[in-house]
Amino acid sequence: MHQTTSQPSGRRPRRAIGAVLALGLLLGGCITQTYQRGYIVPEGALEQIPLGASQEQVLIVLGTPSTVATVSGEVFYYISQRAEQTSFLPQKEVDRRVIAVYFDKSRKVERLANYGIKDGRIFDFVSRTTPTAGTELNYLSYMFKALKWW
């Protein structure tokens, strides 16, 4: 005589439903939120600013800068930071950017730069170079450090 042990027919579907609910709660808790602080560059905005454009054109396209420097010529800086947070974990910075618009003495665009952090160094994503030491690098370093505590 062969005996089989069987569970009541209602238990198996309950376990499956419980497992699906538990998995759903675990996955539902893994929601990632993105936080943007500072200036958000409109899509295609930098392409609308050719070399030689006036300050007024820059203000129309990009708006009011986050800060202006006049140390060695006038420069408009547009500063932003993006961070992500998954569930209950602490926020993690994923991007820091400084868009710099350099003007000549006649207040025409001389150069554009899109600075960010790459490999722990300030990097211009437009010219694909790292700025050299001097007043500009010191000012950019200060802004990137200030963004960390923002």
Image (tube, rainbow, N blue to C red):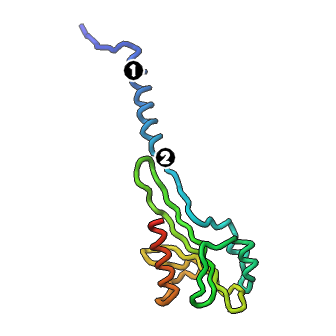
Q: Position of residue 52 (x, y in %)?
A: 73, 86
102 or 48: which is nearer to us? 102
Crowd around label 2: few <14 · some 14–19 · many ≥20 (10 Å): few
Crowd around label 1: few <14 · some 14–19 · many ≥20 (10 Å): few
Give the distance between the C-alpha atoms of the residues marked 2 and 1, in whole angstroms.
Answer: 30 Å
- Residue 31 bears which disc, if any? 2
Q: Nearer the viewer, mark 2 or mark 1?
A: 2
Q: Which residue is located at x 47 percent, y 84 percent?
A: 138
Q: Position of residue 8 (x, y in %)?
A: 36, 12
Q: Which residue is located at x 51 percent, y 69 percent?
A: 96
Left or right? Give the position of 111 relative to 5. right
Looking at the image, the residue that sits furthest to the left is 1
Q: Which residue is located at x 43 percent, y 74 percent?
A: 119
Q: Which residue is located at x 48 percent, y 65 percent?
A: 150
Left or right? Give the position of 116 relative to 77. left
Q: Position of residue 144 (x, y in %)?
A: 48, 74
